[in-house]
Image: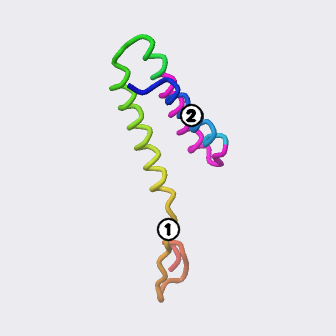
Amino acid sequence: MISVDTIINEIEKHTRIAKGAKDNQQKREHIVAIRALCDVLLAEQNSNTVTFQKNEELDNVQSIQMKNNIASLPSNKLKEEDANGESLFDF
């Protein structure tokens, strides 16, 4: 079972990242992670099945973060000799 201090450290980490995020979507995702971690802490007081719930919630948060990292990868624009511009509508 993960200690309360470890979960609190994760909450603090997500809080720092959310404060520094420029994009509202990124802020929101870290706030969701904080909320999930808080729910885990509160559930731990009421039940001993927290380990399974916490792991599932953290997996969800990590998959969201991975999707964002993939979506924010830099894209390389194709350069075609016969193209007139960057838009699909430039003929």
Image quarter hosting the N terminus = top left
| Bounds of the magenta segment | 20-39
**Would you place residue 2 above or below residue 63 in this image?**
above
Percent across and percent down for residue 81 are 48, 89
Which mark is on residue 43? none
Task: Please name the residue shown 56% across and 34% down the image.
Answer: 31
Amino acid type at circle 2 is Ile
Q: Nearer the viewer, mark 1 or mark 2?
A: 2
- Say whether residue 33 is magenta: yes
Q: Secondary structure at mark 2?
A: helix
Locate residue 90 relative to residue 43 in the image: left or right.
Answer: right
**Residue 36: in magenta span:** yes
Q: x, y percentage for residue 39?
A: 48, 22
Q: Nearer the viewer, residue 89 or 60?
A: 60
> Which is more toward the observer, 88 or 19?
19
- Mark sitting earlier along the chain (1/2): 2
Residue displayed at 53% across by 26% down: 5
| Amino acid of disc 1 | Ser
Using the numbered discs, state the Cα–Cα distance from disc 1 to disc 2 in whole angstroms: 27 Å
With 42 as the anchor, is 57 left or right in this view? left
Q: Which mark is residue 31?
A: 2
Q: Does 5 sit above or below residue 77? A: above
Residue at left 51%, top 57%? 72
State the image coordinates of residue 57 (x, y, percent, origin top left): 40, 31
Q: Are marks 1 and 2 in contact (CB under 8 Å)?
A: no
Residue at numbered disc 1: 75
Q: Give the answer, above or below, for where 85 lies relative to 72.
A: below
